[in-house]
Amino acid sequence: MTALQPVRGTRDLIGEDFRRHHAVGEAARHVSALYGFEEWATPVFEDTRVFARGLGDSSDVVMKEMYTFEDRGGDSLTLRPEMTAGVCRALVSNGLTQSNLPRKVFYAGPMFRYERPQKGRYRQFHQIGIEVLGAAEPLADAEVIACGWDILVALGVSEGTVLEINTLGDAQSRDAYRAALVAYFDAHREALSQDSRVRLEKNPLRILDSKDEGDRAIVAGAPLIGDHLSPAAAAFYAAVKGYLAGFGVPFRENPRIVRGLDYYSHTAFEFVTDRLGAQGTVMAGGRYNGLVEEMGGPATPSVGWAAGMERLAMLLPEAPEAPRAVAVIPAGDAAEGPAIEVLRELRAAGVAAEIGYRGNLKRRMERANKSGAFAAVIIGDAEIAEGNVVVRDLLEGTQDKVPRTEMLRALAETAGGLEAMQAVITEMVADQMAEQAGQTP
Ligand code: ATP
Ligand code: MG
């Protein structure tokens, strides 16, 4: 039978790929928790209206990229192309719109968009993201951005990554700006792409985000939002920039940033790198003030961002190493039972430990070396009789026979032990200190 392949635009995460991916999620989880964000998980598919309403029907995502299907009951469902709409839907569905605002939400998970696959662009990809729901203050915008920056710093990818920010203004600013844009693009209508002519009718701001070469040339001469800001919108933008300085986040203003989704206002930003070719945006977001209302809730001003985990994983300076374990090796059938006891003791102490399922002592030693184990605990008839074990340092190639009760300490003293047993060692030291404290008169 022919071997089946993964669907175009999807990838398996195995080995180093998985470890990179996991490291991105864990760093984001850790840093966002330091900022007081709580993690939410919402369903991978939603009622299609969540996205059609949430993202706006003139966005590229809704017009061309959604995986939408009818289920067996005849409902129109969509695999989530992003999480913000789902998080806002969840806020409303769970009756969380009135109390305890702002809510600070972190998420991580797979997203789905029907796009042309290429480096850094997939049909199933993953995002991490945060949202502050129910805060209208510019401090929220700045803190959301600062959290993103700190995640990039924690991952070691902040160098070579630049924060670009812009404002999309408030409704008053955007009305004035829209009128100026329509006048400008109308004068260049003939040269616009087919898609952008549609955008000119539906949402002229979207043209600024077009990836069409011809459109980009016209966009280069388009009016700027900065010249159409209301005093309130200008003050808001100035406050965000002031707070960013306070958080120590470097940024560059880019008046050309508009986000690809329809629901943004005020702050818009992207973290971009030149290290990923055409797919240079690693993290992107902004303020959105109408989305919770689109989900049937009250006005809930919010701000957030999403970042592509694949793009961040590619930027990681090095892949995290696979964790090293202890190989437990019984010499002879009679040793299997005691070896299992050793395994249990190690795992209970928080040390990764493995036992081979077959083979003689030599084969097991070979496999232990290949597996990347930092040490082996070997136990045979003599050791059982004496109450000892043999602890072999696989990185140094030396070994010692020690009393069973000294096994953890002996493992900690091997060349790879310190790194592999960090948590256990800290506990052993703490125990020792407690003991000594107990002894002092
Ligand atoms: P792009 O301009 O690259 O298409 P976008 O504006 O559609 O991005 P957002 O909807 O803002 O992207 O999503 C936030 C982040 O998610 C992006 O900056 C990117 O890192 C990541 N991302 C978006 N689409 C994909 C995809 N198809 N494959 C991998 N990562 C993606
Ligand atoms: Mg896109």
Image (tube, grey):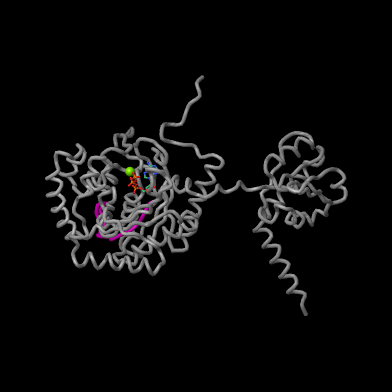
Residue 76 coordinates in the image, percent (x, y): 29, 37
Of the four image quadrants, the one with ligand 2 is top left
Residue depicted at 46% across the width and 31% down the height: 6
Kindly indicate the quadrant of the structure image that contains residue 169. bottom left
Kindly indicate the quadrant of the structure image that contains residue 422. bottom right
Give the magenta part as a residue range. 293-306
Residue 231 coordinates in the image, percent (x, y): 19, 67
Residue placed furthest toward the top: 1
Is residue 141 in view from this perspective? yes
14 part of magenta stretch: no
Q: Taking 15 as reference, is 157 left or right?
A: left
Residue depicted at 26% across the width and 40% down the height: 213
Residue 339 coordinates in the image, percent (x, y): 76, 45
Q: Nearer the viewer, residue 203 or 156?
A: 156
Is residue 40 in view from this perspective? no
Q: Nearer the viewer, residue 272 or 140?
A: 272
Residue 436 coordinates in the image, percent (x, y): 75, 72
Residue depicted at 18% across the width and 57% down the height: 174
Q: Is residue 274 above or below residue 429?
A: above
Q: Is residue 434 above or below residue 314?
A: below
Q: Nearer the viewer, residue 165 or 343?
A: 165
296 part of magenta stretch: yes
Q: Taking 13 as reference, is 269 left or right?
A: left
> Where, quadrant-wise, is the C terminus in this rendering?
bottom right
